[in-house]
Amino acid sequence: MNDQQLTRTALLWQLLSVVIVTLPHIPHLPYWITLVVILCIVWRLMVYLGRWSLPPKWLKTCLVLAAGVGVLASYKEGGGISVTVALLVVGFGLKVIELYHRRDSLIVLYVAYLVASTIFLFSQSVGTAIYVILAIIIVTSALMSTNLSRETGFIYPLKRSVLMLIPAFPLMVVLFMGMPRLGPLWEVGLDKSAAKTGLADTMIPGDITRLTRSAEVAFRVRFDGEAPDQTKLYWRSIVLSDFDGRGWLKDEEKVPKLPRNRDIKDNRAFHYEVILESNQRNYIPVLDYLSAWPSELNAYADMTLASKTKIVNREQYKISSRLDRGFGLDKTADDFAKELHIPLGNNEAKRLASSWWQESATPQAFIDKMKQYYHQNFNYSLTPPPLGDDSISEFLFETKTGFCGHFASASAFLLRSVGIPARVVTGYQGGEWNPYENYFLVRQYDAHAWIEAWFPEQGWVRMDPTAWVAPDRVEKPADDVLSKDNAFLQDNLLSAWSISNNQILMQIRHRIEALNYGWHRWVLNYHHQQKGLLEHLLGALSPLKLALFLLVPFSLVISLTLLLLNYKKKRSANPADNMINALSAYFAREDMARRTGETVTHYCDRLAQYKPEYAESFIRVSTLYEDIEYGQVCDAHRLTQLKQEIGYCLNVNKNLLVRLQWFLT
Amino acid sequence: MLSLLFKPIVELSERWAANRRPKGRLIELNQRSIFIFPTLAGWAYLAVCFVLYLVATNYQNNLIHAVSFLLIALGVLAIHYTFFNLSGLCISAVKAGHCHVGELAEFKLKIYANNLRNYENVFLCWRGERDGQRIYLDKTREKNLSLYVMAKKRGYLTPQVLTLETVFPFGLLRAWSWVELDLTAIVYPKPEEGRLPTSFDDSIDGRQGKENAGDDFSGLDEYRPGSSLRHIAWKQYAQGRGLLTKNYVGQESKEIWLLWREWPELSTEDRLSVMTYWALECEHHYREYGLHLPNLSIQPATGPEHLNNILGELALFKAEGSLQ
């Protein structure tokens, strides 16, 4: 049964499904693999058209060997999913050449299912999902076409498989909702880190320019209850306390962990949920002061939150923060050797700081002097001129142009010069509020750097020097402010429309974003909602309830499908019988229905006696019926005649409606 | 060794399946008579679903989870689709064609359905026979088909169980049904040339060239089906006068008796073969011939019905499964 030869329709379907599932992989496959697949498809098409013949066995063996070596050579370092996908694509591409029997096509199609699903490892947008559904429909049609024993029209397998797939979708939804998800069974890595942007562990002023140009989504936040003011949304991610003269580094020593706070029902805390895109690092942006966090994460004394492993997938965390509470109050000035350290160099800056310090009575007055100085001469720009070795002095006295990194770096340095412990914090600021789904969308261009200074009574106090220069940057979303700058989103011209100020465009964009958010929350991150949703639907969970939740809709959908399949059985296959039944139903009102077991001839005779003026018609009906049923001449012409005759008979009461009904069926 | 271990189980399941087999001349397939089990491709499909589930779990990818659930759902539905591609089919035994030993016996069947579903790729074959036929039912609600069985022995030939199977729509499952159709062919002995029966006219031996030399042409008759082609008046046919047969006087008078005792040197089977040969020859030459067997005799006559009668008796003479 298995060595059945493929029909021509089936072959075309195989080729189509190979093309469909390979297309989205082309950008991240070595170009030669695409060429091999195209060559194979063209070769098979030429065989199909009868121009070429199938390749000899030795050539096929050579091709397989060459392709295997090629894949290994193309991926010298780094294995992972890309190699697997490449091998799968090469494999089933080559198999296309020898598509001849049903068995060959099964291998191709099963691999096509796998390749189609791996598209999701590279993109998970709504568009991709629609594409993959289409691809699966096509592969399924191809699978069906191999199981047809005859040449059919090209569309026939598609039509039938779509009908067969329709009931599978509700079943899929039920399984998706109810099936418990397991954690990863073993460590896997996605080697697509190069394409990702995120905050770095170091900050050398100039680096964040790159971030500012990317409109990629960093994370989304949904607040339970009220959200804080936009100006208070400082999403701290990394604390940099080590300054080497040019750049700021993360503290190399281990920062102590923050003890777990038991008191979760804190009325003054903001509760929120962060849906974090993969950033290939450990940090998780949070608001300070942290009061509750998921147990699988580590919170540190510098008020940062980090995952134990790199975040390679989209993750979702429930976090609570107290914005009004200070931290670091238990420390003394002696604890801050690191936060006070200033390397050699930048002497002009040091002199400037000490002159201000002498003039001011309190630290606040010093800070005011700093603010004033920035106000006078400084410009906010995304394309500042490069800085030399004495970067702080050069920035303060010569270029006087920069963005958040420059201001934060210089301010922390000035504070340290006069003995105030200070450090740089990087993270994100603000976010775009989506009114339809009530969440903040934070993009990579919202990345920001600010400073923290420690005072004995207050603990760590946040200061944002950038806000002194360009207050807009904090008060409004970044896109409003930055879009005036030409360098903004330079790398991403296509997304320029997304920051347009046009009202309608803005609304559309928010709608799309809201849809996207729902997609992320309810589909891509469903495993985080699953427990809550099921508990909401079913009350306290038990295995029995879960089993019922899966089984009941499952059996419902299947029974419905079976009913539909059986419904077709109920109808009589014979159109002539249907017409006689209609006739009988009509005369049933006058107590002249056909009796059980009565022959059609006898019934028509009876009707002819009952309505002598139509006798001739009834006789013709009976003759036609006999012809159709027993004369083996059931042609369309006779059926039409019968329909007309019966229609005439039904017209006894000149009822237009009955007549219309009759000819419409 | 292993087969010995499984023998009782196999026998038991065989008996169970045999009891469930529908029998008769008209059979409608239903859940009682349809079996279903995954094919090798079906197991492979399950493996693909499992691999997808593993990938989804390891990469925490809910969309791949969705794909694997979709494929699993489709697999579950395929059980029903495959079943419904067989259920509701009616098989009716139309006719068994008779043949000689060494030929293929033809069994005519009619397949139809009392519903409007399309049936695709249903494979029919006699169990044990290699060749079968694939059929489909679409808008034409019925199919007539012939299945053949090699006749190895004279006597009654009741084919093995008829297998109907289908893997449509996705080849993941095989649904099949075994039915026992009440359809029997009679297999005639294989004709073998032998000595002439004594009552046979010598002239038949030299029939080439001087056909019916001893008979006198007596006129033309209208052609009746079954008349020998040799007697057709081709000249008159060419003149456009229709099919006529030439009549010879004296032909009917010569009766030939195929007597059991005439070939004492041959075994039973060989005797029957020779008698079959001469019966065919006589029918071919439009001679009247009778049959005499130890337990019965048939008066001389001619015509296809008579021939069938005689061949039937020859076929069933002391045959296994015959009523005598």
Image (spheres, coloured by chain):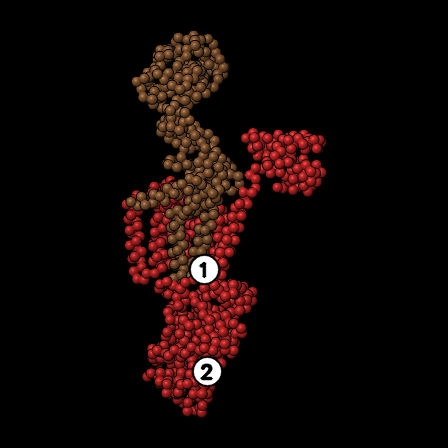
Categorize mark 1 by other alpha carbons within 10 Å: few (<14), some (14-19), many (20+).
some
Query: Callout 1, which amino acid?
Result: Met
Under circle 2, the secondary element is: loop
Rendered brown, the chain in question is: B
Distance of mark 2 from mark 1, alpha carbons?
44 Å
Give the image quarter of residue A631.
top right
* Image quadrant where one finds the N terminus of chain A: top left
Subunit of label 1: A
The colour chain A appears in is red
**What x and y, as percent, mark residue B129?**
37, 35
**What x and y, as percent, mark residue A288?**
45, 78
Q: Is residue B19 above or below residue B259?
A: below
Q: Is residue B14 above or below residue A402?
A: above
Give the image quarter of residue A354.
bottom left
**What residue is shown with label 1?**
A179
Co-location on one chain, circles 2 and 1: yes
Categorize mark 2 by other alpha carbons within 10 Å: few (<14), some (14-19), many (20+).
some
**What x and y, as percent, mark residue A283?**
40, 72
Checking the image for residue A326, the label placed there is: 2
Q: Residue at x 38, y 50 (%)?
A: B44
